């Protein structure tokens, strides 16, 4: 009887987990970590765009296997003010790190990541400004809104932060 009860609980949890995954994928089109993307080309494209728009580049390194990467994506989806600030001030580039593609050639240009997701902030020319362990931006099972916002403001171009301050 005990084995049957455990089996029923496992099946119910699996069904609940599967239905939640389906719901989250229909919420919005999340940019995924793709092992088939050319990270070097993506960064090159971001540099060209950042020069035109006078923005910083935010490399978001992680993988589809990473629960904290998904939590960070969800954080940006549910915090429109922070998401808007990110879009106004940064070119976001997702860099896959997984067993399928560790992007070693690209990532070897930056300091080693302590964990994932990991942020690298680049200037508009692609020069590394800051390496950020996103664990320092966490709170409980998510991310601390004020810490993330402070991080983004700190490394945005000064001109864009001043412009944002004048409009709010």
Image: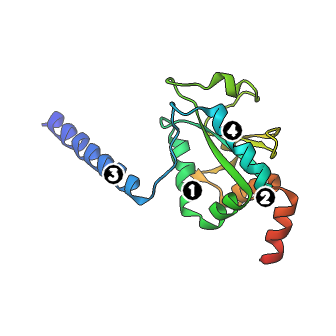
Q: Which residue is mark 3?
A: 22
Query: Mark 3 touching mark 4, by CB under 8 A?
Result: no
Q: Residues within 10 Å of mark 2 (few under 14, many from 20)?
A: some
User: Which residue lies at the image location 82% right of the left edge and 72% below the top edge?
Assistant: 165
Residue 31 point in image, percent of width and height: 52, 48
Question: Which color mode does the image show?
Answer: rainbow
Q: Which residue is mark 1?
A: 75
Using the image, tell me which numbered label, if any, was put on residue 43. Answer: 4
User: Which residue lies at the image location 70% right of the left edge and 55% below the top edge?
Assistant: 148
User: Which residue lies at the image location 23% right of the left edge and 47% below the top edge?
Assistant: 12
Whole-angstrom CA distance, mark 2 to mark 3, is 34 Å
Q: Residues within 10 Å of mark 4 (few under 14, many from 20)?
A: many
Report helix, strand or loop for mark 3. Answer: helix
Report helix, strand or loop for mark 2. Answer: helix
Query: Mark 4 touching mark 1, by CB under 8 A?
Result: no
Quarter occupied by residue 116: top right
Whole-angstrom CA distance, mark 2 to mark 1, is 17 Å
Report helix, strand or loop for mark 1. Answer: helix
Whole-angstrom CA distance, mark 4 to mark 1, is 23 Å
First in sequence, mark 4 or 2: give its number: 4
Q: Which residue is mark 2?
A: 153
Q: Nearer the viewer, residue 97 or 132?
A: 97
Report helix, strand or loop for mark 4. Answer: helix
Compared across the picture, whether 140 is left or right of 91 comes to: left
Residue 6 point in image, percent of width and height: 22, 38
Q: Nearer the viewer, residue 121 or 36?
A: 36
Above or below for 154 versus 105: below
Quarter occupied by residue 108: top right
Q: Quadrant of the C terminus?
A: bottom right
């Amino acid at each position: 009887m005990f084995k049957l009860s455990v089996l029923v609980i496992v099946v119910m949890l699996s069904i609940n987990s599967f239905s939640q995954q389906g719901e989250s994928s229909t919420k919005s089109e999340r940019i995924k970590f793709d092992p088939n993307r050319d990270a070097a080309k993506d960064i090159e494209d971001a540099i060209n765009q950042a020069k035109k728009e006078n923005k910083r580049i935010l490399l978001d390194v992680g993988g589809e296997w990473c629960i904290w990467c998904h939590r960070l994506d969800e954080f940006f989806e549910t915090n429109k003010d922070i998401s808007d600030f990110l879009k106004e001030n940064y070119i976001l580039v997702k860099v896959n790190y997984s067993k399928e593609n560790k992007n070693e050639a690209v990532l070897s240009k930056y300091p080693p990541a302590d964990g994932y997701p990991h942020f690298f902030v680049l200037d508009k020319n692609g020069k590394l400004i800051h390496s950020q362990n996103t664990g320092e931006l966490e709170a409980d099972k998510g991310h601390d809104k004020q810490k993330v916002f402070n991080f983004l403001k700190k490394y945005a171009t000064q001109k864009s932060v001043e412009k944002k301050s004048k409009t709010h």
